[in-house]
Amino acid sequence: MSDKKYWQSFGELNNSEAYQQSVKDEFKEELPFENEGLLSASTPRRDFLKYLGFSTAAATIAASCEVPVKKAIPFANKPEDIVPGISNYYATTYVNGGEAVSVVAKVRDGRPIKIEGNDLSNITGGGTSARVQASVLDLYDTARLRFPTIGVGEDAKEVTFEAFDKEIAVALGSNPVTILTSSIVSPSTKEIINQFIAKHPGSKHVVYDAVSYSGILLANEATYGKKAIPSYKFDNAKVIVSLGADFLGTWISPIEFSKQYAKGKKINEKNPSMSKHIHFESVASLTGSNADERFLHKPSETGSVAVALLNAINGQAVSIADAKLKAGIEKAAKALTSAKGEALVVSGSNDVNIQIVVNAINEALQSNGKTIDWSATYTYQGVDADFAKLVEEMNAGNVPALFVYGTNPAYSWFAADKFIAGLKKVKVAVSFNGKNDETTQLCKYVIPSHHYLESWGDAEIKTGHYSFLQPTIAPLFKTRQWQDSLLLWNGSTTDYVTYLKTYWSAKVGGENGWDKVLQEGIIAPASTNTVSANFSSSAVANAVSAATSGKKAGKYELVLYQKVTVGATDGASNPWLQELPDPVTKATWDNYLIVSPALAKTLLNIDLTNNGQADAYEVQPPKKVVKVTVNGKTISLPALIIPGTQADTVGIALGYGRSEKIGKAAAGTGQNAFVFTSLNGNTVNYSVADVQLELTNETYKVALTQTHNGYDTAQGNRTEVMKELTLAHFKEDPKEILEDREKELAPFGGLAKFEKDGTIYPVFDRPGIKWGMSVDLNTCTGCSACVVACHAENNVPVVGKPEVLRFHDMHWLRIDRYYSGDMDNPNVVFQPLMCQHCDNAPCENVCPVAATNHSSEGLNQMTYNRCIGTRYCANNCPYKVRRFNWADYTGADSFPDNQKDVLNDVVLMMNDDLTRMVLNPDVTVRSRGVIEKCSFCVQRLQEGKLKAKKESRPLETGNEGKWDLKTACQQACPTNAIVFGNANDSHSAISITRQENKLRSFYSLEQLHVLPNVTYLAKVRNIEEEHAGAEKKEEKEHA
Amino acid sequence: MHLKYESQLREPLVYGSKTYHDVTEDIVRPIEAKPSKLWYIGFYIAVALLIFGVYSIYRDVTYGIGQWNLNKTIGWGWDITNFVWWVGIGHAGTLISAILLLFRQGWRTGVNRAAEAMTIFAVMCAGQFPIWHMGRVWMAFFVMPYPNTRGPLWVNFNSPLLWDVFAISTYFTVSLLFWYSGLLPDLATVRDRAKTKLRKHLYGVASFGWSGSTKHWQRHESLSLVLAGLSTPLVLSVHTIVSFDFATSVIPGWHTTIFPPYFVAGAVFSGFAMVQSLMIIVRKVFGMEDYVTMGHIEAMNKVIVLTGSIVGVAYLTELFMGWYSQNKYEGYTFWYSRANLFSPYGWSYWGMMACNVISPQIFWFRKMRRNLFVTFFMSVIVNIGMWFERFVIIVTSLYRDYLPSSWAVYYSPTIWEIGFYLGTFGLFFTCFFLFAKYFPVIAIAEIKYVLKTTGESYKEKMGHLEQVPAEVFGHSGHGHTTVDNHAHN
């Protein structure tokens, strides 16, 4: 080492005075803790008192505000499969009576929160219905029975399972048992029932469905020798004629049929063709609303219409008085005969004779084996006459023990009082129903079964098509699966899970096979060939004469129908379903009397062609109440005027007027219309040929979510809102819609330059992801599965009837329904409307605090905690999709529990800790005073993007059928009418859809230059050429 | 021959023979005397209304905006209607004090003080609505652009609602300053006459030590001029910006370029009507007929008939454009939702037409302009009409806009919506009663100023000129050309 001195500056080298000073001053500012002032600081007495006073006051104020304590307790021992924030998906099966749908339950932190369709199913293909979507809420229903009880009504006392079993054993003794169930779809359960019957001599199994298909079953027995319902192949049919069968809404297997139907309605622009659907009905239904052509008849004429159709097909004369109807039948016959082998006729009637005639028609059309497939039959088994016989036996005192499962005759049987009287004579009445429904209330022994999401099981949806149930959550209450009870009471030592496993392991190849079917949830048969059955025409002649034999018809007739939303069983207790607007009537929370515009004029004195009266009817929720009397039984219901209903026919939905014990949502909604059904031979008749209608002075408020139904206004037809045309038009002038749009946008640069020339502001590039959606109005049937899916996915609050009445409904996605044409029998089009995520969103620039803004991916985002609730955005939204939290619907407010007299019980129930388990933790629960709206399921988009990112690959939104994400509405849609994805990716499904459907694409209200991101594909109706041609010509002449 | 010092066309601004002392006595008397029974009754009614309003707001804040009958289609109803209505009323005061000051309109002195007070109270009432109509009013401070830790996250300067925040707060501030600076000399007068210590102290503080020195007067005059200059554009801008709330939107019936002038005219219209209502009561109750003369009332009626007609032209223009544009959406709003009497809200449109356009036309007749009862009745009618105008614009545009599927059910207010509105009446009149009791309702100093050139006392003072022959008068340097001309006659 040298002693050389290293220096950095001359100052250092010379050690100048200035340098010394600078060294000394380097850390001139002393560190604060050396500061005397701070260390010796003292609080003067006055300051101290001030601080003391302030902090005491502050603490007092803070302490006096009650802050709700919410606990989040981590697992002591974390279950292996549960990762907080990560969802698990379990394949299971939605079962409601004879209806079974393969689904996948999304389980988050141990609780199922969302139902998706099972994509593997070749029946539903991942589609769902509104009721399937809503079923997850039933799991958390506060009205579920929570423990077994013994005793009726007030005397019911909670008992343990052991005590229950003991008492039942004593009570049953060696008596024969009648097991009364809805149609059983489970093969293993059928076996258990059979074993039970075998062990208890004299026992029997009676199947009773609230809305039965007895007519079809018996007709098929008569003509095909099979008491079963075959598969229908709507996708193989070029011509579909439905005689009142609501096959897109409620008939047999609506999800499957919707899917098939949509295949025929999808249009290939290069070679446009589509199936033709002609509908005959009495009261407007979802299916009728979708038909290309609809013809109206009285319900008493159903037989005549069927026979006339048969005659017309066979080339005989049609003897129908009504000219329109006659023309319709001839038209239908012509269309059908020209498509032999590719035609299908279905009927929703429960009359055996009519169904036999329909079978004969299908035979004549060579449908058997082509559009009607006997290779797989449905599992509906209920024949009404069997049950009627049981009621007789009960009243005769011949039924010592009755087990009730999945059915509720005390509500749904037309002679409920007779059933109730009979039930009183039954010594041992056991109910396995999960809810304290009208029948269960009368049973002494109640041992509730699990909800399907808590259950094990299997379902044979159609022969050979199996679907499995596995629990997605441990039972919430002291409930026991009813199969377990049957096994136990039958002296078996195995429980149902073991039984099920043993039953299936043998069939599917042991433990591994069993695990696989559970995981997939499905076993599908290998062969998909359609099979025909031998037709015997012996019963046809009698049926023809019976079907046409003069029924005594009165002035007015009545149709009892099921709503797509609530249905005829326990749907009334589900708040999501109750608040879901019926797609046909747009009404919520009630049933009502559907009347035609013509009848409204004479009966209600409301003339819808008079603007003033129409306005008054629309804007005022109180509707006139009509007294409906059938055979001395009377109910009073408000009347809604629904076009598409036969002039002298009225309709009432079943499934309402329930006991409030099945849930707060059911309380006080509607009237029970089952009292108007009647037994007609072997089957229940869901129409009445003679009703008395009497207008009362009363009114009743009906909660409608849409009050105006046409887009043609006094000041012009709003074709920018909606575009529809006929197939003939489309073939003749495929560019019609493009030209329309061009014309609308001509003042602003035309289609090509519209984006740039329609504004004075600069236009920006939109690189990266750009989310877009397309809704095909041709395949959208309006079934509303998407609306409930959106409810479930996005924690959309339920607001209750009083709030819907005030137009406060919160649906993020709604289905607008428009009528056009003839007011008595209009064309109907459904338009799902969600936030359009406009690129030039009018809501965004009016928010004073920038709470709603645009993402770089084209989403119109809502920042709830920035929102101050001025509602300016909602006012300025031309689509009116923004929803405001008028009250604390969710219980998320900072003023807790203050909505008792503000909101009704149902909303408060939705905020119960149990019900809140259904909430999706990925989505903020909005508090009072903020705006909310469709987010394109942004939580799913983030999850999907993350998934792609983790796998280091580009996002796939339908690229070669691969999906990283789907929005909830898209996933729920049974017809794939909704396509969503990255519009900047030319291989994504959305880009391809837009590319392939250029001629039908339009944006709603495009001329406003808000640049929406949802494309609609125009509705095309398959209406006859000459008719359409004439119309076109007329238009041209006008022009 | 009174032509030398008195205009043939203009009537005197002050009636009777008043000395400066009389003026002070007349105007300060109500402040120094015990309030009358009538005052107490009125005040208690106002306070009761105010309390009801406060309770209505309490419900709105505690339970949510669902306490009102607004809905998914009609996001604004009575709340913003009342807001615009009150803001409109708040226009006359500043117009009278600022614009008329700049135009040297002497007659403003009689009414400007009360009109300005009315402006301030009306703007206070107006401000309640945008505040309490918020769903989360406790977050209202978000509308203030201030540096913050959220990013920082700024307000949206594109939003007309934000412009409102600035426009209204600026207008309020300037109006308040203008009003208060004008009050200073008068407060000093009250202070100087005060007999109790407390009074002296309070009015002393309130008058900011005004001593009446020439310097004070000079500064006061310059300040008035500066504030008048500042307020003048504000009078026009405030309602212009309020109209932007609607004009910049996409909703048919709102999206209209005519709105700014139409709104300003409407605001002046309703403002003057409100001044009429109040002044007719005040001059009667406090016996100030000599200061607020029929001349004043007639002048204001002229403004009313002028602005009412401007508004009428605007209505007709809208209807014309609804047809001429061939825009079916606007056509529907203007011709069906509004002009069709038999549509659900047709009554409100024709109510507006009758009140605002048709009935004020009677003011073309001088007899009517000078009839107190007719004027009072019409002033109320005009304000009802202007309320309807805002209701028509807001509700009939929203309730049936673009998508027929979203057309709303009938909107009528709940008791709490009405209560909120009544509450602002309570606030307004509580303030006004207190103002009338504790402040000079007429600008004493300004009246004294005009007294130099008008009124009987002026005439008396000038009486000696009668004795002077015209020729002499003309040459003595006292007169001016008019006098000369008359002298020649």
Image: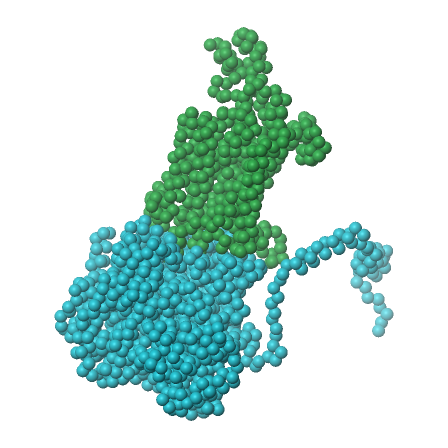
Q: Which chain is cyan?
A: A
Q: In the image, is residue B5 above or below residue B140?
A: above
Q: Is residue A259 visible?
A: no
> In the depicted view, which residue is nearer to us: B77 or A549?
A549
Q: Residue at x 27, y 84 (%)?
A: A226
With B46 as the anchor, is A483 left or right in this view? left
Residue drawn at x 64%, y 30% is B32
Residue A271 is drawn in which quadrant?
bottom left
Residue B489: where, in percent of width, then height? 46, 10
Residue nearest the viewer, comparing B152 with A447: A447
Q: Position of residue B54 (x, y in %)?
A: 56, 47
**Left or right placement of residue A298 versus residue A8 in this view:** left
Residue A608 in picture, x, y percent from top left: 29, 54
**For this rendering, which residue is in front, A748 or B305?**
B305
Label the green chain with its letter.
B
- Classify A1035 as above or below A574: above
Q: Is residue B392 visible?
A: yes
Q: Position of residue A270 (x, y in %)?
A: 29, 68
Q: Determine the residue positioned at 48% across, 85% down.
A: A167
Drawn side of residue A601 relative to residue B154, left or right: left
